[in-house]
Amino acid sequence: MSSRENKSDVILIGAGVMSATLGTILKQLVPDWKITVFEKLANAGEESSNEWNNAGTGHAALCELNYTVEQPDGSIDISKAIQINEQFQISMQFWSYLVNSKLINNPRDFIMRLPHLSMVQGEQNIAFLKKRFEAMSNNPLFQGMEFTGNRAKLMEWIPLMMQDRPSNETIAATKIDTGTDVNFGALTSMMFDHLKSENVDIKYKHSVDSMKRTSDGSWELKVRNVDSGNVERHTAKFVFIGGGGGSLHLLQKSGIPEGKHIGGFPVSGIFMVCNNPDVVAQHHAKVYGKARVGAPPMSVPHLDTRFIDNKKSLLFGPFAGFSPKFLKTGSMFDLVTSLKPDNLVTMLSAGAKNMALTKYLIEQVMLSKEERMEELREFIPTAEIEDWDLVEAGQRVQVIKDTEAGGKGTLQFGTELISAADGSIAALLGASPGASTAVHVMLEVIKKCFPQHMEEWESKIQEMIPSYGMSLMENPELLHDIHTSTAETLGLSEKSEKVLVFS
């Protein structure tokens, strides 16, 4: 091991969208800080942020039915949808700032305007969708949402899905035109391209093997060069662990008390991708359905138009699966080695509570391609097996922890930020809405871990994010101004959409 100590102000572990976002914000706030990034793969954004490893939905709660819950009295609670939408608006403002500051050249390389629809079948689900629509369309965040059960109108909205659909089938949908498709892999690469400078050192093919506190309160990391095997020591006052599913192991290595009694449950996914350009051309939307009973929220079926490298694609899924790996490039021993004396009871409790989920995952793993086609035909009745191929999606590790509401071993669905009491280290765990809300989450990291700087940084943060510290829902005029300006800057206005021609 090299005896030389390499000092940084900030170390970022993992070159995904979270580290890219945090690094970019910090570089704007304190350009003279030395930042070092470690990524065990050869490029940025190759794991969870990669465009083929996630759905690419700009999660603004416009179409995801699991963000709106029907209460026992029949009313619809849209508070989660409001929260996620406001957080996505923060991302949009920051991305607009990057474009206006010439830090990103062409926003169309990572974001496209695309209608978001929710589609349901059966009278009970239609009644839920209508109540959801009524609750949401009265809110300024969801202005422009439409509802219909009219088959002629549905044929306009989703022609591929309505073709040859049985005439006696009851079906309804909501549609909002301000949705987006986001290539998070491309966005991550763009931010890291900008970050490269004399004060930022990005080390690919470098794996963090261990970390410990030093006498002065800094963190010392042992970092291994994946190719040569050489090990170096690196120290920093602040460390961010943004390694996707790999973050749990690194959090455990830190030994901080906040990382105790936390486990992770890995869920893999499979998408079906259409290889027939004639079929792809007939669909232009992201359409989300309802999750089956017993299915985890990230397994909500959806039929997505995607724009990857400016080429239009069509994906359906995800089909859930199980692998003990915490990353696509991880180890088959990831789950076993994450079991520690402090989280064993938590993990066993979660296992006992989630037998239905385990059964569901086993069933999903066992599906044949023809059985997957049957699920696809609920969305596209005319789907032909030879037009579709299977693509493995990214690994997601759902957080398991003890909570007051759920008791021991509660499975969490969402994104979890865990930080040390002294703010010297923070880790991000969990899954969707993840990347879409990265800017909000990284601002939370900054607030928790750098409270002593917040006063001096606030004006710059407000320059990057004009709504910072305000509720857009409670400021409709500000919301309108921000909607208009971000749509214009990011090429998402109706005018921009009409001039686009895709190969």
Image: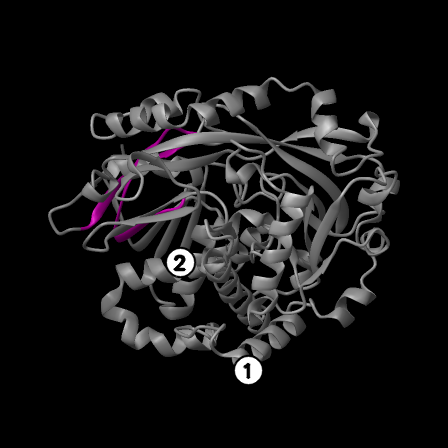
Compared to 163, does 438 lie above or below? below
**Which one is in front, 178 or 425?**
178
Q: Is residue 226 magenta?
A: yes
**Which one is in front, 247 or 29?**
247
Label drawn at residue 477: 1
Q: Main secondary structure of the magenta part?
A: strand
Label drawn at residue 442: 2
Is residue 129 found left or right of 268 in the rendered image? Answer: right
Amino acid type at image mark 2: Met
The residue depicted at 74 percent of the width and 35 percent of the height is 378
* Percent of width and height locating residue 419: 27, 50
The residue depicted at 84 percent of the width and 29 percent of the height is 384
* Percent of width and height locating residue 34: 34, 59
Measure the alpha-carbon separation of dots 1 and 2: 26 Å
* Percent of width and height locating residue 474: 47, 76
Neighbourhood count class around disc 1 (C-alpha, 10 Å): few under 14, some 14–19, many 20 upward:
few
Compared to 459, does 159 lie above or below? above
Residue range corresponding to the magenta coloring = 218-242
**Which one is in front, 332 or 417?**
417
Residue 196 visible to an observer of this rendering: no
Amino acid type at image mark 1: Glu
Is residue 406 found left or right of 290 in the rendered image? Answer: left
List the single residue furthest toward the front.
73
Q: Quadrant of the N terminus?
A: top left
Q: Earlier in the sequence, mark 1 or mark 2?
A: 2
List the single residue furthest toward the bottom.
477
**Which one is in front, 159 or 192?**
159
Is residue 464 found left or right of 161 in the rendered image? Answer: left
